[in-house]
Image: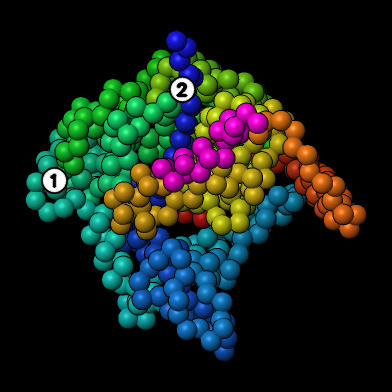
Amino acid sequence: MATSKRRSVVLHFDLNRTVLMSDAAGGRTMENTVDYLLSECSWGYVNPNRPSEWICVSGASSIEPPAAETNGHKLITYKQFVDDAHPYQSLAAAQGRDIDQIKAVNKAAKKKRTALQSAFTGGEDAPGRRVRDSFKEVMEKLHFPMGEQREAAKQLAATMPKSRLQEAWSEGRYYLLPSFLQFLSYLSSPKVTEKEMDVKLVFRTFGDDIVEVARELDLLVDGQHPVGLPALPERFRLKLEPTARRIGTFYRDGFEADGTALAVGTLTKVPFSSKLVEEGPSAPNNFYATSDPEVKVIRGFQSIQETLNGMLQGASTLALRDYWEWWSAHAEDGQYGKLLLIDDEKMGKDDDVTVFFDDHIEAHHPHIVDVRDVRSGAPVDFEKSRGKYLQRVEPFAAITDPNYFTSLFEKFLSTAMNNQPSKRKRTDTSPVKTPAAPLPDAETELLRALEEEILKEEEKNKHDKNKKFPLEEEENDDYDESDDE
């Protein structure tokens, strides 16, 4: 009897502030990091008599705005209030010396944003003092419970070399969030393994935290993790050796399909330098030929996707380092961010699922993920990718709800499966006869179509103009993903 093909489910997970909370990258304290994430889910309004003041109405942090009396004032989060007060300028159209000027403005704006949002609840005059109890709750949930688990974490930390994982455990804090640890255990349970689907994990980061995630996964697979969960299957181990073909690093120097390269077998990125412009497309090849000749550089969307598919054939867990410099150089525009290649035509036929989970995905734009059609190379409209290829993660809920990722995955998968065309009855596949639209409606649809074509053409012209954006030397190449908003 023929067996049905197992459905491919590829889950891309951002790391910092999605599945882990790290305070080491930018010199912040964990208290600063928690204040920042609470500023994203605490609500208030702008004082109409004093526009520089935000008035908090939340009694506790919440993803949805509270039902509070505001006298008709629009509710916004404190993070949004600060972002609006200190806006970034776009680098996409900058030319010559304007680039340095705009980068300086953006650097100053980011510094102000970070300072304000990282001090959200501290002090008697802090704008978020009303949600201080939420701050205490989050800080408590970021730590192992008192007793056996916390002591086990500290004992293991004493045997580790200095690292962010070691530092967190030595202080009794989680590295990977408990809700994600529970999710990994769920993926290895019969609830998932007995279904006709093949689940793969792809960890994505701009930073250098993949090594520590791999170390924690080792402990989970070996059954030595302080949380005491059943040992994960061997397929969850993330092998970092170049020959294992489980890791890769992106390099981007252009907007079109041939403007992206993937270096397979390394987590070392091409240094951001003005020399890259002189070297052109050969820059990554030249860099890795000198630093690590074993690394293979693949260029172009189609070739990269074929390579990633091959890597996933022999593994359940991959890790990819994205090119923060390209995203930063374009005012943190989503179409220059973490690349997610999709084949909509093939996925529709096979009922496959590919989705990117990231806390930086916004309500109205992708912000940090660049969803592209692998066949055409064109960006996928956010209205189409949202909820289908992109799923926002709420850090507050990921910390406070131990079942957060499991529930989020089940809800997403249920929606995705219900929307798959193969789930329809055979009679549904025949052409559907619909009555002709009345003339006014038809004219309206035609106008809408023309408007969409004009917008697409304008967008294409904008990107054609800037697709080879000059790379400028950064004054400080240190990366702090917690500042990625």
Residue type highlighted by circle 2: Arg
Instruction: Kindly tell me whether residue 329 is visible in this rendering.
Output: no
Q: Position of residue 161 (x, y in %)?
A: 22, 35
Q: Secondary structure at mark 1?
A: helix
Residue at 52 percent of width and 23 percent of height? 308
Residue at 65 percent of width and 59 percent of height? 89
Residue at 40 percent of width and 38 percent of height? 208
Q: Secondary structure at mark 2?
A: loop
Quadrant housing residue 378: top right
Q: Residues within 10 Å of mark 1 (few under 14, many from 20)?
A: some
Residue farthest front in this picture:
427
Q: Main secondary structure of the magenta part?
A: helix
Q: Position of residue 159 (x, y in %)?
A: 15, 35
Chain part drawn in magenta: 409-427
Along the horizontal axis of the image, is 95 left or right of 437?
left
Q: Position of residue 320 (x, y in %)?
A: 47, 32
Along the horizontal axis of the image, is 245 left or right of 129?
right
Residue farthest bottom in this picture:
49
Q: Are marks 2 and 1 in contact (CB under 8 Å)?
A: no
Image position of 179 with respect to 233: above or below: below
Quadrant housing residue 430: top right
The residue singled out by tag 1 in the image is: 149
* Residue 411 is inside the magenta segment: yes
The circle drawn on residue 6 is 2
Residue farthest top in this picture:
1
Residue sitting nearer the eye, 173 or 56: 56
Instruction: Kindly tell me whether residue 132 is visible in this rendering.
Output: yes
Quadrant housing residue 123: bottom left
Residue at 9 percent of width and 46 percent of height? 148
* Residue 454 is inside the magenta segment: no
Q: Position of residue 367 (x, y in %)?
A: 58, 51
Q: Residues within 10 Å of mark 2 (few under 14, many from 20)?
A: some
